C-alpha cells in the first residue's frame, strides 16, 4: 500500500490500482483526510479489486466507506468515476463534477441522442465511410444499454474558481470537455486527472459540448497544459502513473509533440491528401482500423487547430470536407 503523504492541513492517501488498459500502468485516485472530513478525488474503476483497495486505504486512515463525506471528480471517464455507484449505495454523499460532466455521468437520454447525431454527422463529413457507420452502430448500442450504467444521484456542479473541500477548481478541458484540476490552498499541490500523464501521451478527445457544438479539443488541451505549467505547483498528482514534479518540462515536451504532429499533417495535406479519414489512415496506418474513434479524434482535433491558426482551409464537396494548405 502506498505511503500517506502529510501536507500542512491535510493528508493524501494515494490509491494505486494496476491497469488493464494498454499503455497505462496504473489507475490512481486519492483519499484526502483533513480535520473533520474525508473525501475522494476520483473513484477508480468499477471492480471488486478496486473497491477492496479503497476499503484497505480507508482502514489505513482509520475509517470506512460510511465515513466518506464527498467525491470530487476530475472528469467523467469510467476509470475515474467507476466506484461512485457502489460508494453511494453504502452512503449517499455529495458528488462534485464540472457542468459538462453531469449528462455524461447520468447518461442523459437527450444528451446521448444529440451526441449520437453529432458523431453520425462528424464521421460522414470527415469521410469515415464504413468505419464511421460501424462506430455509429456501436454508439447506438451503448445508448440502449445506457440506463443500466447511469449514475442516479444529483451531481453538484463546480467550475473555475469554485472552492470545494479546501481545493480551488481550475478548468483544464481538452482531454475531455469536463476536465478540471484541484489546487490546494497552499498552491503547491494539484490533482489533475488526465490532463498531463508522465510516460504516456494524452489524447484530446473530440466530444460535443452540452450545446452540441464541436469543441476545439487540441487548442483547449494546449491552453490547459500552459495553465498547469503556470500554476506554480511543486507536484501534480495524476490519474495514471507517477506524480509529476518536472511540470514545465513535461508541458513543453507535450506541446512540442503537438507541434510536430501539426508539421506532419501539413506535409500530408500539402501532398494532396485532403479528406480527414484519408489523412488519418496515412498518418496512423493500421490504427485507423483498430482504433478508429481515437485516431480520428486526434486528427480532427489537430485539423481544427491548424484551421484556427490559419494554416489550412476547408471546402465541402458532396457533403465531405476537404482540407487544403492556406
Ligand atoms: Zn480520462
Image (cartoon, rainbow, N blue to C red):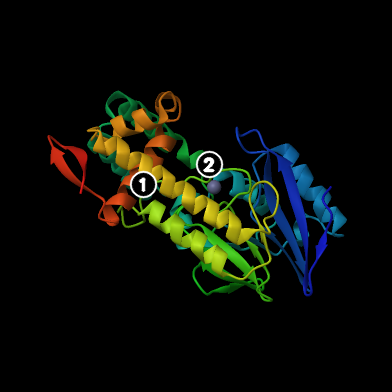
Image-based side of 203 in relation to 54, left or right = left
Whichever of labels 1 and 2 marks the residue nearer the N terminus, that label is 2
Q: How far across and how far down the image is residue 237, in percent?
A: 67, 57
Q: Crowding near pointer 1: few (<14 within 10 Å), some, many (20+)?
A: many
Q: How far across and how far down the image is residue 320, in percent?
A: 19, 36
Of circles 1 and 2, which is in front? Answer: 1
Image quadrant in which you'd find residue 181: bottom right
Q: Which of 177 and 59 is in front in this view?
A: 177
Q: How far across and how far down the image is residue 168, in percent?
A: 59, 72
Q: Which of 78 and 252 is in front in this view?
A: 252
Q: Which of 212 and 147 is in front in this view?
A: 212
Residue ranking furthest to the left: 318
Residue 268 visible (yes or no)? yes
For mark 2, give the secondary structure.
helix
Image quadrant in which you'd find residue 267: top left
Mark 2, residue position: 149
Residue 73 visible (yes or no)? no
Cβ of disc 2 within 8 Å of ligand 1? no
Mark 1, residue position: 302
At a point 78% along the width and 57% down the height, the residue shown is 13
Say above or below: 191 vs 21. Answer: below
For mark 1, give the secondary structure.
helix
At a point 34% along the width and 26% down the height, the residue shown is 131
Contact flag, marks 1 and 2 (Cβ < 8 Å): no
Q: Crowding near pointer 2: few (<14 within 10 Å), some, many (20+)?
A: few
At a point 25% along the width and 55% down the height, the residue shown is 310
Image-based side of 297 in relation to 70, left or right = left
Amino acid at each position: 500500500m502506498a505511503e500517506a503523504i502529510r501536507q500542512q492541513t491535510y493528508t493524501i492517501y494515494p490509491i494505486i490500482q494496476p491497469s488493464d488498459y494498454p499503455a497505462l500502468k496504473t489507475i490512481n485516485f486519492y483519499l484526502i483526510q483533513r480535520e473533520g472530513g474525508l473525501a475522494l478525488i476520483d473513484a477508480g474503476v468499477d471492480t471488486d479489486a478496486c473497491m477492496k483497495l479503497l476499503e484497505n486505504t480507508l482502514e489505513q486512515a482509520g475509517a470506512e466507506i460510511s465515513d466518506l463525506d464527498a467525491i470530487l471528480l476530475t472528469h467523467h471517464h469510467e476509470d475515474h468515476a467507476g466506484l461512485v455507484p457502489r460508494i453511494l449505495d453504502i452512503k449517499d454523499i455529495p458528488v462534485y463534477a464540472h457542468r459538462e460532466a453531469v449528462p455524461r455521468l447520468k447518461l442523459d437520454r437527450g444528451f446521448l441522442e444529440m451526441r449520437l447525431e453529432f458523431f453520425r454527422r462528424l464521421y460522414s463529413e470527415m469521410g469515415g465511410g464504413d468505419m464511421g457507420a460501424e462506430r455509429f452502430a456501436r454508439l447506438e448500442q451503448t445508448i440502449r444499454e445506457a440506463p443500466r450504467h447511469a449514475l442516479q444521484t444529483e451531481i453538484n456542479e463546480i467550475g473555475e474558481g469554485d472552492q470545494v473541500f479546501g481545493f480551488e477548481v481550475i478548468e483544464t478541458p481538452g482531454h475531455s470537455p469536463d476536465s478540471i484540476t484541484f489546487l490546494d490552498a497552499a498552491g503547491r499541490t494539484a490533482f489533475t486527472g488526465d490532463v498531463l500523464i508522465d510516460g504516456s501521451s494524452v489524447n484530446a478527445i473530440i466530444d460535443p459540448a452540452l450545446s452540441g457544438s464541436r469543441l476545439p479539443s487540441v487548442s483547449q488541451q494546449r491552453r490547459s497544459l500552459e495553465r498547469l505549467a503556470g500554476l506554480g505547483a511543486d507536484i501534480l498528482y495524476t490519474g495514471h502513473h507517477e506524480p509529476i514534479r518536472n511540470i514545465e518540462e513535461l508541458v513543453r515536451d507535450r506541446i512540442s509533440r503537438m507541434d510536430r504532429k501539426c508539421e506532419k499533417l501539413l506535409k500530408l495535406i500539402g501532398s494532396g491528401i485532403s479528406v480527414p479519414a484519408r489523412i488519418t489512415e496515412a498518418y496512423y496506418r493500421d490504427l485507423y482500423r483498430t482504433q478508429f474513434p481515437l485516431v480520428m479524434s486526434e486528427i480532427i482535433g489537430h485539423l481544427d487547430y491548424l484551421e484556427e491558426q490559419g494554416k489550412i482551409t476547408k471546402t465541402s464537396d458532396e457533403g465531405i470536407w476537404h482540407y487544403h494548405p492556406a
